[in-house]
Image (cartoon, rainbow, N blue to C red):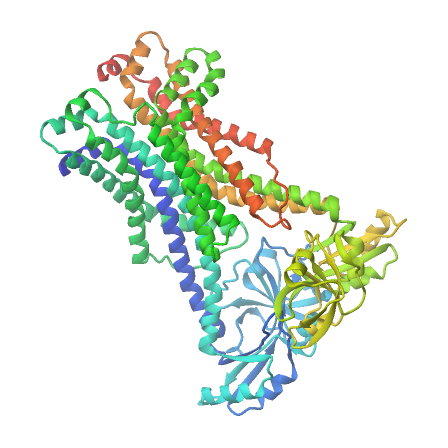
């Protein structure tokens, strides 16, 4: 039986390749994610040691909640005077710090940060090494990392403007640096400045973000650490070198793991789609070998032997696909690197590491997918009696099984229940929630594949009606697509999965955009909003508030605060101005300028029993406490999106920072757009990071950001659709082989090669349209459920992008025609006499 299995596969090498290709794609993505991740883990592990290898101790500010308060610069002298301490370097850093190129364009990135650092002279404590020019020593000098200098054309010796939190400043570029051994910046722009210059530019005068400590040679580290811990204040902690390396590595590892999990999620979708394709392919292949299998049974082969032979074929397919997937995964690693380089977020050089775990996992996944897919067809082949098999096909039966349909409906109901529990219930942690959502989606997809054959004939009859006007090819294509509902449904199921996920993303995106539009129309009174990728100096809001053309101006910032012992994120703003800028839907009380006033959302007030006039004990990150009073209760937090609003009094002292996340403005009565543009132009000269948008522009920018996210998600989901289209092409190619005799008879009675090709293409289009329609229906349902499950403060309107979905259906139908190109060409070139003889 083994020899027979090998000879059968060798005689059908193209069929083997088509069957294996779907698995190769999924395995390649899994392998690539692990190879890339293992390489990055290795590189960043080495980088972590390089960054902190010369630092024996780091002293950091700490806080039980919220932002940390920077260290007083005098602490450096205190620590430096301790026995056993060789060197203490205070450092400050902030972002964004935006260099401006020679042509006047501020540097921008596609996501990576732009960070400014104070320069450290001690090479053992510094993470940077000068590779050109010299280090920034004093005054208005700076250095920039090597990759950024090359990418944006910065040259040593020239003067450039640099935009910092305190505004634009002109500095001389005196050096180019390397971050670690390989300058692994991941697309970030890193600049360095003399310490006192950095403190002034970053608004950190008299403060340090942390202290780096190097011990004297031969000093007892434990003794020195005890002395340091005794000398530093309660709001600081000392971290030793081993802990520093572990923390730095853990920070890198966390980001790498998130990146890996995203790749693995898309690989999982591709593998899930492959299951339908492989199952369908093996059902057809075994159906075409009915007579061969019957002869084996007649010669004495048992049903178990036939089943083992079929599963043996699947296992060999798996071995081929797994080996190809391993090689493809390594190649895909280079492709992903090139993609990130093109996006401006280049990954650092890292070795290609193919760990035994990755190899084993590739084969386990391949075996699992292929054998699971082939088990059903192999089991059906083994159950057919020899005499019956000589007359009939063991392929998927043409009829529709009521039991199969009921099982499918039950699976869909169970999947919907599991998904509903994941979205609306309380499964515990986030992992359990996602597990329920994933299992629920899988149940719905598998259930749909089992139950949709019952709808295949009527739906295809309706879809194929317009094709009948195209003559005989259109009429026959509809009959062919509907003759075997189970096969058609299984072929379309792979496309259903990809289209459902894409449609869900479209519905979610459209719902978010509709919610943003309704919010801006209903609860936003502000005429302008200034947003930035990072926090902006509070001086902007203060300067705008001095302009007579504005009736209300407020900056908005977020930080953690303890209210009666419970930590929550609070919004800081000018409360009175906020009442003019936004409709908060006040339920009780009034907004107040009292520095000890707090405004509470109605749900939080009900949960904690707060009423207007009640006192609340408030604790801040700097350790201070105060008693606030509930001034008002509000119900509309769509824009501000938090439960507590407080004023800005003593914010810098309490939180250690004095920056805004964004600013809102409302024009005074009689002020014009021209007046506003004049003020904004003046502000941009002083603060180039200041970017302002009116309501229409703000809405457009939000919608554009959502669309960019959808493009990124759907670009990855195209993999699943590509696998599905390969499945359609594979099924049609095998179907043409199966119907060779039938096609020969049609040619013999007058059907032309052109008509034959059109018939196959129309059949593919109908299968694609059938799968697309079901996928769109499920995707709309998923999108509605996801949008409903999200908080009303984020999405409260469900919107379906009908036009985009219509375009998607058209594209997939056209792609179905394209997928049929090879099978149609083969069918059109069949020799009539050979085809009849084959039949």
For this rendering, which residue is in front, 652 or 4? 652
Image coordinates of residue 767 in percent, x first then y, are 42, 26
Quarter the N terminus occupies: top left
Quarter the C terminus occupies: top left
Image coordinates of residue 435 in percent, x first then y, are 43, 51
Relative to 295, is 80 above or below?
Answer: below
Relative to 130, is 16 above or below?
Answer: above
Residue found at x 24% / y 23%? 393
Residue found at x 42% / y 64%? 43
For this rendering, which residue is in front, 563 or 121? 563
Residue furthest top as drawn: 749
Q: Is residue 417 visible?
A: yes
Taking 89 as reference, is 666 left or right?
right
Residue found at x 39% / y 29%? 489
Residue furthest bottom as drawn: 83
Q: Quadrant of residue 522?
A: top right
Image coordinates of residue 426 in percent, x first then y, are 50, 54
């Amino acid at each position: 039986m083994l020899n027979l299995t090998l000879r059968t596969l060798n005689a059908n090498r193209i069929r083997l390749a088509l069957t294996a290709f779907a698995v190769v794609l999924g395995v390649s993505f899994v392998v690539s994610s692990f190879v890339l991740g293992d390489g990055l883990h290795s590189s960043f592990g080495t980088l972590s040691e390089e960054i902190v290898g010369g630092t024996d101790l780091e002293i950091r500010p700490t806080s039980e909640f919220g932002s940390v308060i920077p260290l007083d610069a005098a602490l450096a002298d205190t620590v430096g005077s301790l026995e056993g301490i060789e060197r203490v370097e205070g450092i400050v850093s902030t972002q964004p710090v935006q260099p401006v190129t020679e042509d006047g364009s501020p540097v921008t990135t596609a996501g990576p940060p732009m960070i400014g650092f104070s320069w450290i002279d001690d090479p053992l404590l510094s993470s940077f090494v000068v590779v050109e020019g010299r280090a920034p020593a004093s005054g208005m000098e700076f250095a920039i990392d090597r990759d950024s200098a090359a990418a944006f054309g910065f040259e040593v010796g020239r003067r450039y403007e640099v935009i910092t939190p305190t505004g634009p400043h002109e500095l001389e570029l005196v050096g180019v640096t390397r971050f670690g051994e390989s300058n692994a910046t991941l697309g970030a722009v890193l600049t360095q400045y003399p310490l006192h210059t950095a403190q002034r530019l970053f608004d950190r005068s008299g403060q340090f973000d942390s202290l780096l400590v190097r011990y004297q040679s031969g000093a007892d580290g434990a003794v020195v650490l005890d002395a340091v811990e005794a000398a530093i204040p309660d709001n600081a902690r000392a971290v030793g070198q081993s802990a520093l390396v572990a923390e730095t590595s853990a920070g890198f590892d966390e980001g790498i793991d998130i990146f890996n999990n995203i790749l693995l999620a898309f690989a999982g979708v591709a593998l899930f789609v492959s299951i339908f394709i492989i199952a369908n392919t093996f059902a057809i292949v075994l159906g075409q070998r009915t007579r061969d299998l019957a002869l084996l049974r007649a010669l004495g082969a048992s049903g178990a032997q036939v089943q083992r032979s079929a599963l043996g074929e699947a296992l060999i397919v798996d071995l081929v696909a797994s080996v190809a997937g391993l090689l493809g995964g390594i190649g895909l690693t280079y492709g992903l690197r090139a993609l990130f380089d093109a996006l401006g977020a280049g990954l650092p050089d890292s070795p290609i590491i193919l760990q035994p775990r990755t190899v084993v996992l590739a084969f386990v996944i391949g075996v699992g997918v292929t054998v699971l897919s082939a088990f059903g067809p192999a089991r059906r082949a083994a159950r057919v009696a020899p005499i019956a098999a000589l007359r009939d096909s063991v392929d998927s039966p043409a009829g529709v099984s009521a039991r199969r349909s009921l099982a499918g409906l039950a699976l869909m109901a169970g999947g919907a229940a599991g998904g509903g529990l994941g979205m609306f219930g309380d499964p515990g942690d986030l992992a359990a929630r996602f597990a329920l959502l994933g299992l629920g989606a899988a149940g719905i997809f598998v259930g749909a594949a089992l139950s949709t054959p019952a709808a295949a004939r009527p739906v295809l009859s309706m879809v194929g009606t317009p094709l009948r006007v195209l003559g005989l090819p259109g009429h026959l294509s509809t009959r062919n697509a509907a003759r075997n509902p189970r096969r058609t449904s299984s072929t379309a199921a792979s496309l259903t999965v990809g289209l459902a996920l894409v449609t869900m993303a479209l519905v979610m995106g459209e719902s978010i955009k509709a919610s943003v539009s309704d919010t801006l129309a209903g609860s936003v009174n502000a005429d302008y909003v200034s947003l930035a990728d990072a926090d902006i100096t509070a001086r902007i809001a203060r300067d705008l508030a001095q302009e007579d053309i504005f009736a209300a101006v407020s900056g908005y910032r977020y930080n953690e605060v303890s209210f009666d012992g419970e930590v929550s994120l609070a919004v800081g703003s000018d409360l009175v101005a906020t009442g003019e800028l936004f409709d908060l839907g006040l339920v009780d009380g009034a907004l107040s300028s009292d520095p000890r006033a707090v405004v509470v959302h109605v749900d939080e007030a009900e949960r904690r029993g707060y009423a207007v006039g009640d006192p609340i004990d408030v604790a801040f990150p700097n350790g201070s406490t105060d008693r606030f009073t509930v001034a008002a209760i509000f119900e509309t937090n769509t824009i501000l999106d938090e439960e507590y609003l407080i004023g800005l009094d003593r914010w810098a002292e309490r939180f250690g920072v004095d920056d805004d996340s964004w600013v809102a403005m409302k024009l005074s009565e009689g002020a014009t757009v021209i007046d506003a543009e004049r003020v904004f132009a003046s502000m941009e000269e002083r603060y180039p990071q200041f970017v302002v948008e009116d309501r229409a522009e703000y809405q457009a920018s939000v919608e554009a950001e959502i669309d960019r996210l959808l493009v990124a998600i759907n670009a990855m989901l195209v993999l699943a659709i590509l696998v599905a289209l390969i499945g359609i092409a594979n099924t049609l190619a095998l179907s043409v082989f199966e119907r060779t005799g039938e096609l020969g008879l049609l040619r013999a009675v007058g059907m032309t090669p052109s008509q034959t090709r059109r018939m196959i293409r129309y059949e593919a289009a109908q299968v694609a349209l059938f799968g697309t329609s079901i996928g769109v229906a499920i995707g709309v349902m998923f999108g509605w459920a996801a949008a409903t499950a999200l908080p009303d403060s984020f999405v409260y309107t469900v919107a379906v992008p009908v036009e985009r979905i219509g375009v998607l259906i058209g594209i997939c139908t056209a792609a179905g025609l394209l997928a049929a190109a090879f099978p149609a060409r083969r069918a059109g070139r069949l020799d009539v006499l050979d085809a009849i003889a084959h039949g």
